Image (tube, rainbow, N blue to C red):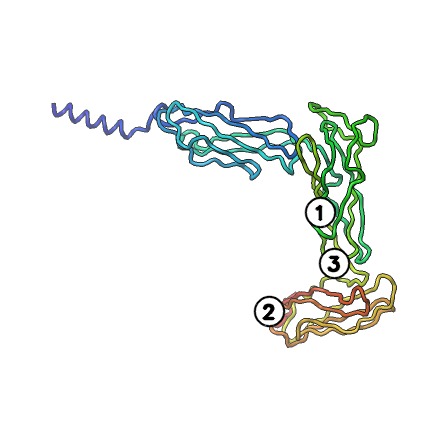
Amino acid sequence: MKKARFIAILLFLFTGALPLRGEEVPRIVFESPDYDFGRAYQGEKVVHTYQFRNRGGSALIIEKVRSSCGCTTTLISAKTVPPGESGEIKATFSTRGRKGRQRKTITVISNDPENSAARLTISGEIVAPLNLVPARLHLHEITFGKGKSEDVKVELSKDCDIRRITEVHSTSPHITAEVEDTEFSGKRGGPLSFVPRLFGRRKEKVPGTVLHVRVSPVAPKGRLSGRVTLRYENGKKGEATLQVYGRVVGNIAARPARLSLGSIYPGAGKEKSIVVTDKRGRKLVINRTETGSEFLEAVLEPVDISSVRCLVKVKPGAPPGVIRGRLKLFTDDAAEGVVEIPYAGRVMIQKRTPGND
């Protein structure tokens, strides 16, 4: 009797130490983990619900659901699913700002020991009804006081029925844009014609219109950037964006535009030169200078009638550390009275040796 009881206890302890069999643990099974939505218009939201079932023998706990990018959001019906019960994960994929073939993943973290990170996918092709060519406009140098203008082509996809452009908006007060015609004609053969091809395989283009982009003459000198947005009606509302870049430079320009003083060794000082030129060929008059530092001085030397060389000198007594500021040259020009040149350098602690650069 005692022996039988001892054997029973051993069997209990032994079976208790064994891992649970497949039917005694949670098991997540998706009916269809991969979803291809085919084609969607840019700006639409693709919504799909993934169905799953707990085919295990204990409660399934969904710990976390994460997507590969912020464009996809998820919503789960329940975090705890009893054995034999079903659940849902609703995914919403925003196509705004995206174009072409897309594939996003969703990872479902659960207490399923064999599939603790189940992977779902959502994929398809996003068709842009309206395309701006180029999508990024680099205007390079823009002369202060003159402004600049450039045209961007507006192309329509044949498989999209755009009715009209409702708004053109710029994020920069110095960049404006307008289209030639906000209404699109449905007549075949016209310059703005299109043929609806909702299920066409090829994304053909038809002649579109022109977006006129202009930079104001009063745009301040320096880097210029902004975003132009075209909003349109395509059954539903959509939009296309154009990134605009450039640099506004004055008629009075300095070369180099930024002054690097490099390494400055104690007791040695340093000297760098800048040539300032009036690109209109006028006589350049610089009345005074400001270095912004007591350890820097600027000396002016005439080059010709429209150019002046400015020698920037670092005094030998400058303390160790970074020297940074803006050199200001005051001219007699009414529109460009001050020319500013950023400068930077470092005064070293140790004196220069033959091995130093």
Q: Earlier in the sequence, mark 2 or mark 3?
A: 3
Q: Residue at x 64, y 29 (%)?
A: 40
Residue 269 x %, y %? 68, 73
Q: Mark 2 and mark 3: span between their CA atoms?
A: 32 Å
* Disc 1 and disc 3 in contact, CB within 8 angstroms: no
Residue 161 point in image, percent of width and height: 72, 29
Label 3, on which residue? 220
Amino acid type, label 1: Ser
* Nearest to viewer (mark 2 / mark 3): 3
Q: Residues within 10 Å of mark 3 (few under 14, many from 20)?
A: some
- Crowding around mark 2 (Cα neighbors within 10 Å: few <14, some 14 to 19, many 20+) is few
Residue type at mark 3? Pro
Residue on which disc 1 sits: 170
User: Which quadrant of the rendered structure holds the C terminus?
Assistant: bottom right
Q: Earlier in the sequence, mark 1 or mark 3?
A: 1
Residue 162 % position (x, y): 73, 31
Across and down, in percent, residue 350 comes to 59, 71
Kindly identify which numbered label has been placed on residue 73: none
The answer to whether 151 appears left or right of 54 in the picture is right
Residues at circles 1 and 2 in contact by the CB criterion of under 8 Å: no
Q: Which residue is located at x 66 percent, y 67 percent?
A: 325
The single residue placed furthest to the left in the displayed view is 1
**Front-most of 274 and 171?**
171
